[in-house]
Image (cartoon, grey):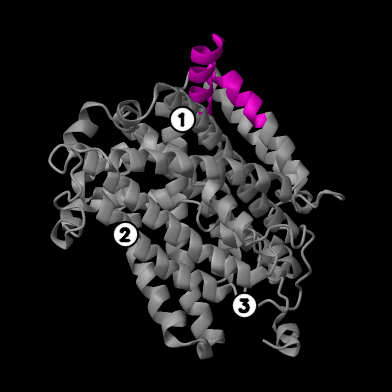
Amino acid sequence: MSKAAVGAHRERGGTESGLARNALNLPELVFTAMAALAPLTLVVAVMPLHFLVGGAAVPGAYLVAAAVMGLFAVALTTITRYVRNTGAFYAIITRGLGKQVGSAAALLAIVAYNALQISTYGALGLYAGDSAARLLGIDAPWWLWAAVALIAVAVLGVRGITASAKVLTVVLTCELVVLLVLAAAVLVRGDTDLLPAGSFSPSTVLDPGQGAMYGLIFGAFMGFESTVIYSEETVGGARTMRRATYAVVAVIGVFYAFMAYVVVAAYGADGIAGAASEDPSGLILVLFEQNLPAWFGEVVSVLLLLSAFAALLSLHNASNRYAYALGRERLIPAAFGRIHPSTKSPWVAGLAQSALAAVVLVLCVALDVDPYLGLLLWGSALGFLGIIGLWALCALATAAYMRRNHPEAGIWRTLVAPLLAAAALATVFVIVVMHFDLFSGGTASVNITLFAVAGIAVVGGLIRALYLRSRSPEVYGRLASTNVLGDDV
């Protein structure tokens, strides 16, 4: 695209981003996005639930989910050639479906990302408490370790995305290495079933009765879209973001499918569901114990702690950039749009996010909420409910915006891929709603409360947009107008 075209494409009312420019290169962006998915934690703590519901079909189902997310990636990377804003879903949905829908989506995104981030403190508190007691003989409550992590996350968040990226890169590399070592150890065993029946059979993988399994498996991709959130801060801008998005979808989809295949091969196609039912928490850890030295298990336990911390840090950076984007355009108080003068981090939004996390942790302690069955599961369920809804809306908004403004980009990118993705993701959203108790593990009253929180965010965003349209039309007119483009589009 020529410089003249780029200049013409800058929306009126837009401003250059105050975030650090060229702070992340391609590998750092990929690792930062993947860290939010916490691969080791997912394989050890979450994948057993997938096997409990889907049995031997899980490996193939990951590939199906990756194909759907690939369609969504086509839509996402196409529109970000023209809409580049750290508000990501908020900006895209606003451009495609209007300011009121976009404002509702914005507040839903704030709630969803905060729910995902804060809920992870439950996992970290448990992992840290277990490791400290076993390795150091220190017996302390989970919330104390969570508080220490909260302070560390807040400090790294203020120091800027470059410092965070270095931490995330190291941790994620270690996570992937230990999982690959486990896979190699399992596959060279003499009793491994290298051709588990049904794992990739279309009749099994695409069985309509496997809806609940797909609802869970799509949750494994939560956070991949954070590549777009950092698009204002990457070297190479939109081009780097596009490559990173495809890379994350491909690596995560294939890697999770491979690890699921390894687990099925270890237990057998006929035995995996039963093994997951008997001991879901130990399903993967048993494989480490059986196939690798005892000291390696201790390394894994420490890495589980670091995996949870990496996810916390990555989600913290994603959620505070949403708040920054909304404060920058005064959809929420303008103070959230301030950046640190030296680190260029959205420090006000970051500290506010940490303060909210601290309040939630205090409430959990006061109400004796279980860190896993309560904080982790409830927050994760609320987060995924919001994210999957945003995925579907974003795909639909892409089709609407691109056909209206840039049909020259081609019918596949502007219509077919976005609409196929929107239809598939809307179906997953319905599945999540229908099987929400499987995600939250909560009672009917808990589930109703979580639905209500999501609903309040949507209604609150809509009311805020209507208020601005009536009382501050200039602010309303500038919503989602910030568009940071360059010669890299």
Residue 59 lies left or right of residue 161; in this view the side is left
Q: What is the spatial separation of the Cα atoms under label 3 and label 1, in whole angstroms?
A: 43 Å
Residue at the spot 30% in from the left edge and 61% down from the top edge: 64
Residue type marked 2: Leu
First to last magenta residue range: 124-150
Mark 3 highlights which residue? 82
Q: Nearer the viewer, residue 373 or 188?
A: 188
Mark 2 highlights which residue? 63
2 and 3 marks in contact (CB < 8 Å): no
Residue at the spot 53% in from the left edge and 40% down from the top edge: 174
Image position of 398 with respect to 34: above or below: below
Report if residue 324 is visible in the image.
yes
Residue type marked 3: Tyr
Mark 1 highlights which residue? 300
Mark found first going from the N terminus, 3 or 1:
3
Residue at the spot 37% in from the left edge and 50% down from the top edge: 256
What SS does tag 3 mark? loop
